[in-house]
Amino acid sequence: MSSIPHFRKVQHLPLEEQFMWQDRNRLALYAAMEASMRPVSVLDRLDVYSSPHTALRELFFVQNESGPDSILCQRLPDGRVLEASLLVSGVVAAVNMMPFTRSEQIELGTSWSTPGNQSIAIVGFDHSSFILATEAIANIRAMAQTHCPIGFKAEPCEITLHDQTAIIAQTPLGTARHKVAPGKEQLPHSPFADPCGVMARWCTREDLVPLESNHVDTYRATPTNSGKYDYFRMTGEKVRYGEVVQLELGFQIIPQNGWLTMNIDLRSVSVVDSTCVSRLRNRIHAHTPTTTPPSELGIQPTIIRKPRNAYIIASVERAKRAQEGRHHHDKAARVETSKARTLRDALIFGRSPDEAAS
């Protein structure tokens, strides 16, 4: 298995990150990443272009006929050029993608994304092919700077998340109306992607038009006996932290704040493996609730209030029972289970034992 030995210190990282760095889980992530890239053609892999010679021979930027941006393209043997869509596999470190259920999701600006975008950040947990992919991005950025020698701002397309280099990609939710070419067909998002109308309201407010280039397709990849994958479109499901995904990326030089900068365009996301995230949450897909949570329907959920010091109250009660010589386990204390639960509910939810029993 192609990887760098694990010598990292992870004690200072969040617990979920420490969990992912455990050998069992890290090797499972590596296996899923490698399996997803195995059927991919060599020149469609992003990590192949970590070689400057290969990148310069196969790739170059072409000025877009219908706008001020330039698009990364591949040279075909017959002399034609093809828009480049390069594939990379990694683990989701942060994500802000449809379906959106509240406006804050698209208005939130973070250190790795801008408002009004679907965005994702993936990491490689020191896998060698992911490290090569980050080197390939550096080569492509150098090519972009050569293509635009004046006015180009070489901002990095990678950031550091919890001591790891993360590749970020984002796609705007809509195109400004004045930039839409005449006759360009609008392509509204489906009800599955926009169940609460958040996206539609955003486009109306910002005067944006959803085009085909503003869509990010999401799939769930299922391995076949032949070693390849069948892809099934995800309808209403979210891409989650810790899942192994395969991203289809495009590269563009776009004007931004008076400068020219390179953007990694998110084209599609395929969820390849969810094993580690299922372990992380101590559940499997069969445990997913069959009913739709109120928040997914845009309904304000009812909040169950409990005392701000509920944990302290419970701790004091446990200490009191220990001083009285009673074991804290229900069975050892010879307390009926129903009665124990009544006392627990009374402590945590601030109700009297009689109310809890009812």
Image: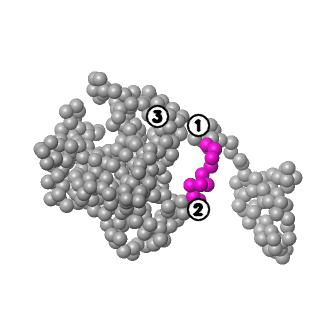
- Residue at the limit of the structure toward the left, as seen here: 79
Q: Magenta residues, as a range? A: 281-293
Seen in the image, is 350 located left or right of residue 189? right
Mark closest to the chain's N terminus, 1 or 3: 3
Give the image quarter of residue 174: top left
Neighbor class of circle 1 (other Cα within 10 Å; few <14, some 14-19, many 20+) is some
Q: Are marks 2 and 1 in contact (CB under 8 Å)?
A: no
User: Would you say 312 lies left or right of 251 here?
Assistant: right
Q: What residue would you read off at disc 1? A: 298
Residue annotated with mark 2: 282
The spot of residue 1 in percent (x, y) is 35, 71
**Distance between the Cα atoms at labels 2 and 1?**
27 Å
Kindly state the secondary structure of the residue where label 1 is placed.
Answer: loop
Real-space CA distance between mark 3 and mark 2, rounded to the nearest whole angstrom: 32 Å
- Residue matched to label 3: 190
Residue 245: where, in percent of width, then height? Answer: 41, 54
Q: What kind of secondary structure does the magenta stretch mostly adopt? A: loop
- Cα–Cα gap, marks 1 and 3: 16 Å
**Viewer-proximal residue among 31 and 341:** 31
Find the residue positioned furthest to the right: 354
* Location of residue 323 with respect to 281 vertically, above or below: below
> Is the residue under label 3 in contact with that under label 1 (CB below 8 Å)?
no
Q: Is residue 238 visible?
A: yes
Mark closest to the chain's N terminus, 2 or 1: 2
- Seen from the viewer's position, the closer of residues 249 and 75 is 75
Q: Amino acid at mark 3?
A: Ser
The three-letter amino acid code for the residue at tag 2 is: Asn
What's the residue at 33%, 37% (across, down)?
213
- Residue at coordinates 26% horizontally, 40% vertically from top-left? 254
